[in-house]
Image (cartoon, rainbow, N blue to C red):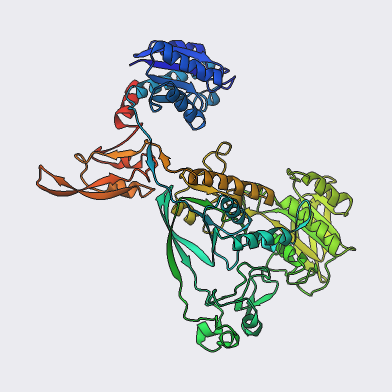
Amino acid sequence: MKIGVFVCHCGTNIAATVDVEKAAKAALNLAKVKFSTTYKYMCSSPGQALIKDAIKEKGLDRIVVCACSPSLHEKTFRECLKESGINPYLLEIANIREHCSWVHRDRETATRKAIEIMKLAVTKVTHNRPLEKTHMPIEKRVLVIGGGISGIQSAIDISFAKFPVVIVEREASIGGRMARFDKTFPTLDCAACILTPKMVTVAQNKYVTLHTYAEIEEVTGHVGDFKVKIRKKARFVDTSKCTGCGACWNKCPAKVASEFDLGLCKRTAIYTPFPQAVPNIPVIDRENCLYLKSKKCGLCQKVCPFGAINYQMQDEIIEEKFGAIIVATGFTQFDHSVYGEYGYGKYRDVITGLHFERMANSSGPTGGKIIRPSDGKVARDVVFIQCVGSRDEQKGVSYCSRLCCMYTAKHALLLKEHNPDSQAYVFYIDIRAAGKNYEEFVKKVQNEYGAVYLRGRVSRIFEKGGKLIVRGADTLSGAQIEIKADLVVLAVGLIAQNDAAKLAQMLHIPYDQNNLFTEAHPKLAPVETITSGVFLTGACQSPKDIPDTVATASAASVKALGLLVQDQLEKEPLVARVDKNLCSGCQACIKACSFNAIETKEVEDRALKRKRTVAEVIEGVCSGCGNCTAVCRMSAIDLEGFSNRQIMEEIEVL
């Protein structure tokens, strides 16, 4: 056995803190290390060539690279070994950047620690075994969870490659939040004019199947072979018969607050969410339908000329297989009721940005008029309050929601366009306009549309004389401000969907303290997750505007297509394996496995002359996390590349 050690300077990332020459020299004192050297950038082409030449000239058969995290360049170095005729799994990465140089300032301490980390890697690599990747079939279909703009864009991109796509959307129509908008910043394009053609394209695409008014019930399996149960909720309307003529909802006597218009108007118990809905087929709200509640109406069934109403319809569970999953579940708004000083819920004329968006929309509840909800009068003096719920660790979330500055600026502009003699006042902390032409847009709103920006917080809002009195501070002038407003608009933050954690657990993907889904790597794998075959797009990952959402949708589509175009899927061999002779069948490993990758199997025990139950790892599902090895009382499970023996040998070295 001949081990080669290669220590990387990583520019000054490592070399500034670690004496790399001293570390390389120390490596030669370790058993079975026959060659050691350094290079400025080991991951570069010259660095790779250095490793290849040393393998050839020195006859090296195992390699240790002391560099940065293996999540960055392990694949690069494995490929280097493969090209040199060595099994790529006879490689170990000693992370002396993130684990050493970046967390130490003292050069002597960092160098000593780097040598210790290198010793561990050398010890481990001596017990590495040659491994080979396995191959498995892949289901050539993609599931998209969510039918907003990101889900729609993903489906369109995948359909271009002529692979089948299924969109599952919980609402009665696709379109998501964007369907509620009037215009989009900074170009002020009509949101419906952009979105509706894409909705129609998806609906008419022969490669795309829409399951609206549906939810994901269960996800099992693994990359290439996900098994998904989908609950199609009963619409009580036969989609094959309905033409969307509107006879039913025009006659329905039951009226309730419209969720789509955030309660600014009412809808009937049988309804389509908005005029451009896709599919343009109504759904009956079972909670408010008089017939479904008490059998006292049935008018919609009587007036339907096509016999499309079916009160006996039941929820349907369908099971389908997919090779990849794209999560596009979007966002919801922060619950701003915690800000009692702003009077939301107490005063009808305190609304959110999304309420304002619906009022500004010509097809909205007010026909495009910006009015006071309390009396229907035109709103002239309007106060906008930013960062409601964002950047507030006490009441809200710590992060910036990214969009609030821009959509507030857009609302101030729309206010002036709809009500020319109006005046907008914007209370802000900072203006964050970091997109293309965003800064120019904000300046235009201030300079050309006369919006007054006040840097400071609002301390209190109360009602007096039919007006809302807004008290706050302008920190730039140092003055206390009091404004008599007709309308107050809260720029509330964007947060994860209420059931985001439940979906994440179902898909076995991580989520952060804010229930936003976590990507595999923030820079190098921004739309991938640690669960192979599951990809992220849009605001379910972090707040995003429409351009960024569409960009991530296309990125996720490319990643999914990268799987589907393969004849067979390559699977890493770093998986758990069970020694059936040692397994007691206690099934502790099954309970510990987060990926459902272990099942039971009966084997013939010749010594006992009977069958007994043992654990068996489904290699295609196993992610190599190692949970099972930690809980196995009999040490019957070992993880390839991280065997018990390797770990114990490393401990001995320490």
Q: Residue at x 61, y 47 (%)?
A: 554
Residue 646 in the image, given as x and y percentages of width and height:
32, 27
Q: Quadrant of the N terminus?
A: top left
Q: Nearer the viewer, residue 57 or 449?
A: 57
The answer to whether any part of residue 513 appears in the image is no
Q: Which of 400 and 637 is in front in this view?
A: 637
Frontmost residue, 347 versus 122: 122
> Residue 436 or 505: which is nearer the viewer?
436
Q: Specify whether 339 is left or right of 593.
A: right
Q: Position of residue 121 (x, y in %)?
A: 40, 23
Quadrant location of residue 277?
bottom right
**Count of numbered circles on the image:** 0
The relative height of residue 203 versus residue 443 in the rendered view (above or below) is: below
Residue at 52% across, 28% down? 98
Q: In this view, does 235 lie above or below 84?
A: below
From the top left corner, tell me how far across and down residue 136 is, in percent. 38, 44
